[in-house]
Amino acid sequence: MHSNRFRKTISACVTLLTGVSAAVVIAVLIAILGYIAVTGISRLNLEFLINDPKPIGESGGGIANAIVGSFILIGVASVIGMPVGIMGGLYLAEFASSRFGMVLRFLIDTLTGMPSIIVGVFVWTIMVKPSGHFSALSGGVSLAIIMTPIVARTTEEMIRLVPHSMREAALALGAPVWRVTLGVVLRAAAGGVATGAMLAIARIAGETAPLLFTALGRSYTSTNISQPIASLTYQIYYYAGSPYEEWRSMAWAATLVLVGMILMINVTVKILARSRRS
Amino acid sequence: MTTKRGPRREGAFGFAAPLNALRGSLSPLDWLFKLATLLFALAIAGTVVAITLQMVMNTPLTFEKFGWSFVTRSVWNPVRDDFGALPFIYGTVVSSVIGLLIAVPVSVGVAIFLVETAPRKLADPISFVVQLLAAIPSVVYGLWAIFVLAPLLRRHIYPAIQSKLGYLPLFQGNPNGLGLLTAGIILSIMVVPIITAVTTDVMRAAPQSQREAALALGATKWEATIIVLQNARSGITGAVILGLGRAIGETMAVTMVIGNRPEISASLFDPSFTIASAIANEFSEATTEIYKQALVELGLILFVITFAINVAARLLVWAATRGQGKAADA
């Protein structure tokens, strides 16, 4: 056995080390966000947000195409993914037998853990290859596939928190099961389901890999979902690999827009969750 | 994964649904409603099966030509229609292992700090900040890595490593900043949140009485923490494997800094390629059918690896937090 003082010193050193590792992680986050903010802000202005990119050589121009494209892609994904995810989560929480539910949950969690590039390849094989062209719709489907398992599992978790007595009370009043489920249980869990949905949107807003060979990109604003469409993430990737200083600075400004949006969603969810708890 | 909060009665996957008991007494409309929800649930779960089948069906040419040797061949020559997956598997494994070697000590350190040292008022905001790291998109990490991290490593860190350890084959060659080591470093930042979150959950699930018993016997704080870590080791292993699964499937950031060269080289400074980055980089350029199929088959290999890893990790985490539903409600 070591002397007491030695053991206490070791203990203090380790405590210090764990504190240092926490500080390092926070410092890395600040370094990344700080660099994005400082570099991105110089290029960011109203014109950057409402104009399409200009050809290389002309100064000015913005990323309106990518902002519009990202919103359309997220919209398509949500229209498909939200109902499927919420209803699927309802089934898991309310109707599934223990064993069948286990199989479903296992497969759904497998989908959550699947690399998003594989989803892109999958959608390419079922949509882009047969139709012969890239499209916003196929990009939206890719994002929907990534979003549904997240929405389903958070919906399920939130519905499980609804007390049994609420279901029993509604059933005892003679309400049919579908009304109990949609009107009482889902409504009681609505806040939690909504925050889960917001987090899922924040997640797909940052996805690039599944868009590379589905939505591709486009250098001007388009709202046609059967044609390729731009997105913030693809635009950042494209600009990052370009040799032009002008495009690189646009990549940083686009990153500031994207990260700002995603962090805003995350912070909002955190604040909502806290206010719900208290 | 980390959002799994709330009561957990029958383990990670099993749970008796409250309305399941009503099976016999549903009206037709209710029955239809239940069927509709079932179809949606099946659609999500079925996607996994569909993805697997679709990828298998889209690789007949490569499978016919190379068979199982596709996995062990190290040639990648699209011009000659000659393909092998080994360089990509190598790059994937090595970059992920580097990422974990850096991330695991830091993540466990942060988790210990959050659970054992920091008061709740401080621990909550810190774990939120750590989770924000997981919210930053992969392509943003890539952008930062190209223009900030890689130049920093090229100018200051890599020359220093080379002057001290340059005699090792690991650190020879030309450290231009884009290569395996840089990819591993950016991966380490990206997997810290998941490993920290799961480790924190697992450690919180350890009963307080363990710590108190150790402290009452005269253990120092660190010695009591060792006891907790020992009992949580299967859960922590699960957390590490979950991080590995995340690292292996990571695409954009790695594609942007790994240098994209399908070669197996001993030096960590040399450019390499991962499975995911190969697909991201070459899929659009693949003009011949067999080239496309070789990339799809790479995707299939990636899927099988991440699938096995995720199953293992989930089983371990589930075993570690089983029956501790309340403790995981952090």
Image (spheres, coloured by chain):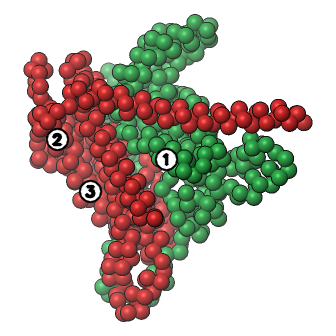
Question: Which residue is denoted by mark 1 in the rendering?
Answer: B125
The mark found on residue B258 in the picture is none
How far apart marks 1 and 2 lie (CA) works out to 41 Å
| Labels 1, 2: front one | 1
Question: Which residue is denoted by mark 3 in the rendering?
Answer: A78
Q: Amino acid at mark 2?
A: Pro
- In the image, residue A5 lies at what x, y percent? 83, 33
Q: Which chain is green?
A: B
Residue B255 makes an appearance in the image: no
Q: Which chain is red?
A: A
Quadrant for the C terminus of chain B, please: bottom right
Residue at position x 46%, y 36% from top? B190
How far apart marks 2 and 3 lie (CA) works out to 18 Å
- In the image, residue B156 lies at what x, y percent? 48, 12
Q: Amino acid at mark 1?
A: Pro
Classify mark 1: helix, strand or loop. Answer: helix
- In the image, residue B236 lies at what x, y percent? 63, 46
Q: Amino acid at mark 3?
A: Ser
Residue B220 makes an appearance in the image: yes
- How packed mark 3 is, by other alpha carbons closer than 10 Å (few <14, some 14-19, many 20 or more), is many
